Image (cartoon, rainbow, N blue to C red):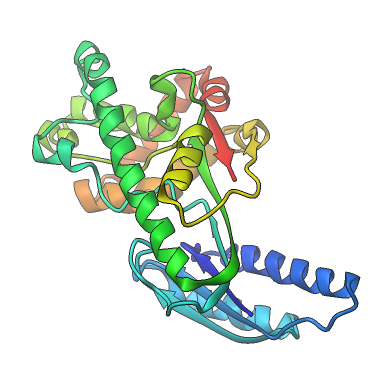
């Protein structure tokens, strides 16, 4: 049996999803009094991932689970072919598919900023910006489904989890954290730490879809049928994440530091200080995050 984690992390949680999957398979085999299958486990991530740590985690996983015979890594974007046709039995992905292949070309080509410092201009552009991101997500997610359908065997399964938003307003379509990052960076523009032109050309390639959007895209693409879809309330998790300024800043850095440094250079010390100040001044942060965001399975 071939199991793949697409878009895996590179930290201590890199094998958590795969470990859960193999435990579930083993438990099911015990229930039906059948020997468990031999399992091959592959982890996929971007080439910049720390695969040395991933490989060490895989070795530990294989030593702890007798059914896992082969392990390996498959570097590359999940928006391209990664595996041979009809070779996968189970595809898992957690907290990855809300990342887009790129920022929407309609915005980058026309130099339209996602977050305008002028609030009036920002509100006027919001529907256009949202639609550009929604179209890019539709294109990327449809491609992802098409590619994985070619790689899965007939009757194979895919389990995905991604960050999403409520669908009751256009503003809620955007995950809160990218907006927070933009507000913090706008402070650095005002302080002269970063250039405004650089700020205006900064695009976070991330989109939080609604469950309705996901269902529509899956049904339109046609390769998969939905067996189950759940919407999870993130408030317990966010209470922990936002409970202290240090946790808040560490969470932002874990999510966005690579793309911030790539675009602006070495500004993370200044960013961290501005983020701590933002946390201390925004008392409604936890409530707003809980109101607008959901994790979709």
Vertical order, 18 against 185 (above or below): below
Q: Quadrant of residue 122?
A: top left
77 and 152: which is toward the camera: 152
Vertical order, 149 against 51 (above or below): above
Vertical order, 61 against 119 (above or below): below
55 and 242: which is toward the camera: 55
Q: Quadrant of residue 145?
A: bottom left
Where's residue 3, x and y in %? Answer: 59, 73
Q: Is residue 186 left or right of residue 70?
A: left
Where's residue 257, x and y in %? Answer: 35, 49
Q: Is residue 165 left or right of residue 230?
A: left
Where's residue 7, x and y in %? Answer: 46, 62
The residue at the point 75 percent across, 71 percent down is 25
Asked if residue 101 can be seen in this view, the reply is yes
191 and 121: which is toward the camera: 121
The residue at the point 83 percent across, 69 percent down is 27
Residue lying furthest top: 120
Q: Is residue 125 left or right of residue 56?
A: left
Where's residue 175, x and y in %? Answer: 43, 33
The residue at the point 53 percent across, 35 percent down is 211
How many numbered markers are drawn? 0
Asked if residue 245 can be seen in this view, the reply is no
């Amino acid at each position: 049996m071939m199991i793949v984690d697409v878009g895996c992390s590179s930290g201590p949680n890199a094998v958590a999803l795969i470990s859960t999957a193999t435990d579930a398979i083993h438990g099911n085999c015990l229930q039906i009094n059948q020997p468990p299958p031999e399992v091959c486990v592959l982890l996929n991530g971007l080439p910049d991932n720390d695969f040395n740590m991933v490989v060490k985690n895989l070795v530990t996983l294989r030593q702890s689970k007798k059914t896992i015979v082969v392990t390996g890594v498959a570097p590359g974007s999940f928006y391209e072919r990664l595996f041979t046709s009809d070779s996968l039995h189970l595809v898992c992905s957690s907290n990855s598919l809300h990342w887009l292949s790129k920022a929407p070309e309609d915005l980058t080509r026309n130099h339209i900023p996602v977050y305008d410092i002028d609030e009036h201009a920002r509100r006027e552009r919001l529907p256009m910006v949202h639609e550009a991101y929604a179209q890019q997500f539709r294109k990327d997610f449809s491609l992802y489904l098409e590619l994985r359908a070619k790689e899965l065997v007939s009757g194979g399964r895919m389990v995905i989890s991604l960050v999403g938003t409520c669908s009751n307003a256009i503003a809620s379509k955007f995950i809160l954290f990218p907006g927070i990052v933009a507000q913090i960076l706008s402070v650095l523009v005002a302080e002269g730490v970063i250039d405004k032109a650089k700020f205006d050309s900064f695009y976070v390639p991330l989109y939080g879809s609604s469950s309705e959007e996901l269902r529509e895209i899956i049904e339109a693409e046609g390769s998969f049928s939905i067996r189950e879809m759940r919407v999870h309330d993130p408030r317990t998790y966010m209470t922990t994440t936002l409970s202290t300024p240090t946790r808040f800043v560490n969470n932002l850095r874990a999510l966005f530091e690579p793309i911030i440094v790539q675009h602006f250079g070495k500004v993370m010390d200044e960013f961290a200080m501005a983020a701590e100040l933002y946390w201390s001044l925004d008392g409604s942060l936890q409530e707003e995050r809980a109101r607008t965001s959901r994790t979709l399975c």
